[in-house]
Image (cartoon, coloured by chain):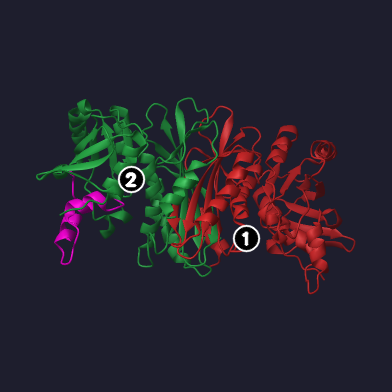
Chain colours: A green, B red
Amino acid sequence: MNEFELIGRLAKSLPTNETVVVGAGDDCAVIDLGLPDRLILFKADAVVENIHFTAETPPEKIGYKALARCLSDVAAMAGAPNAALITLGLPKKFDAARVEKIYAGLNALARAHNVAIAGGETTTNPEGIFISIALLGTVARDKCVLRSGAKVGDAIFVTGELGGSIEGRHLDFEPRLTEARWLAENFRPHAMIDLSDGLAGDLRHILKASHVGAELLGRAIPISRTAKLASKAEGSAKPPLLAALTDGEDFELLFTVASRESVPLLDAWKAQFPTLKLSCIGKIIAGEGITIRDKDGVRPLTAHGHVHFT
Amino acid sequence: MNEFELIGRLAKSLPTNETVVVGAGDDCAVIDLGLPDRLILFKADAVVENIHFTAETPPEKIGYKALARCLSDVAAMAGAPNAALITLGLPKKFDAARVEKIYAGLNALARAHNVAIAGGETTTNPEGIFISIALLGTVARDKCVLRSGAKVGDAIFVTGELGGSIEGRHLDFEPRLTEARWLAENFRPHAMIDLSDGLAGDLRHILKASHVGAELLGRAIPISRTAKLASKAEGSAKPPLLAALTDGEDFELLFTVASRESVPLLDAWKAQFPTLKLSCIGKIIAGEGITIRDKDGVRPLTAHGHVHFT
């Protein structure tokens, strides 16, 4: 059994109660505690040494990334973050100055978004540091955007430029909190997710949750300069479009809106966020899975975000 | 710099905001999101392989313990738990059946207290499993009990019997949720904590937060049968009273009430919880630190819960 099969099995039998609006399977859990106008967003995630960062990663960026990942999940629900708890796993011998710098990066990002660090725990983790973050936020009752609302005919949008995040952006990306809230206040996004697994993989999460398919327009997919440069490097086997489709940790927003909103949205976005690209990359169609249209025709993408380029 | 010094430094510069009623330094963070009658309790904690459990620990008990620790912290605020998120660190090679059993133990405890498991994440942890839990709860605005409210003259109470938890009870203790809520609804506990570090260490947390001292009555401290038996074992260097004062992970409640409430409380408790001992073990005094009174007089306990027995 691999990790994904295990998660699938575990998710089937989780206890729930009357306050859970959305449980496992979206960017955040959504809890209704009876606030008149708002729902609670609840998220937890961890970064682990030698998996998400190494001894060479600047420690401020480790802390920044640990919190920014969770903030990006709150953004994907069009919510606002409020308070976080930090559980820190430390080897028996640890470098206190490094840990203080991790916290400095984390605290600076928290302050920028008025997020309180309301406590946490330290524990021992024999072989390396882990940083587990729990985040509490809220979202207006009528503005919460799930993965499951995409409708046939919707236009598919993505912010920013994709691919090559591993070259550095995964450590200092800006969670799209402001943009997501503006979007939900001014338009009606049907479904939204943040890009952590890669465009193709995360789009598939929306499609499965919404029981629809998608047709992407190859030339419309925004490819980062980093991914383009990397594809020209000696020995590179990854064409830039493949990088944009499958590289993880872009932490941009992927969302769908009714097609009639596309032009007004693009105009309003350009006025509101002149330095952040917004691209319409395709449409939601009946059926399942992803097809991609380019100059040679329409081809299906295989499972898990991988596509066979010939 | 050791772990405690590091935590002290980190805690000084944590970001806060207008919703934080209690941040780092109590059993849970307390957040005010504007619910008319309730405050939010927010807790995170982790258990780590080879620190909190081993390959020999029955996996159901690993999951039980991971969640029960957090529930015990909600109990210490007189709150009710509502929803949890599980972040699971797994080695690259993991035993899926073991993980399913960990979840079975965790789920059973969650169901017993109507706690939803509202999602989580899995990640890779190279050398062993960790289970990080984030827990959301609520407490009535006028019933939340902090560590900081102990007053000179208060009687000090503890539930259950202390010491020797490592022999097994640390894996299947019952979080005192019902008892703590009953206590806050029927009496006025001034300060409360759950026993995780040991009676002396955790009492010291109350004393420091409340700027008071304590005098314990040695013969009133309830000592578990396990601790008594262990002290008789060959080679044992730990007298039973020392075990009750310093052994960790009892997960009983330690609290103070005005002395005039002591007798009514003991009577009502016996009627309400006939199978769970409640002991008055001393009183809050002016000053700082802990003294212990026994047949030989009054002696101070040294820092961090250790006491020199001669």
| Tally of marks | 2
Q: Residues within 10 Å of mark 1 (few under 14, many from 20)?
A: few
Q: Quadrant of residue B196?
A: bottom right
Q: Mark 2 is on which residue type? A: Pro
**Residue B239 seen anywhere in this rendered image of the structure:** no
Mark 2, secondary structure of its residue: loop
- The residue that appears at 70% across and 40% down in the rendered structure is B180
Furthest residue toward right: B295
- Work out whether residue B48 or residue A112 is closer to the camera in this orientation and state it: B48
User: What mark, if any, has residue B91 been given in the picture?
Assistant: none
Rendered location of residue B134, percent (x, y): 52, 46
Using residue B20 as the reference point, say whether residue B108 is left or right of it. Answer: right
Q: Mark 1 is on which residue type? A: Thr
- Work out whether residue A134 or residue B257 is closer to the camera in this orientation and state it: A134
Residue contact between numbered discs 2 and 1, judged by CB atoms under 8 Å: no
Q: Quadrant of residue B153?
A: top right
Give the residue number, with chain letter if any, for mark 1: B57
- The residue that appears at 45% across and 48% down in the rendered structure is A7
Q: Quadrant of residue B201?
A: bottom right
Q: Are marks 2 and 1 on the same chain?
A: no
Give the residue number, with chain letter if any, for mark 2: A175
Give the quarter of the figure containing the C terminus of chain A.
bottom left
Rendered location of residue A300, percent (x, y): 21, 44
Q: What are the residue bounds of the magenta stretch?
A: A221-250
- Work out whether residue B273 or residue A211 is closer to the camera in this orientation and state it: A211
**Residue B156 seen anywhere in this rendered image of the structure:** yes
Rendered location of residue A90, percent (x, y): 50, 63
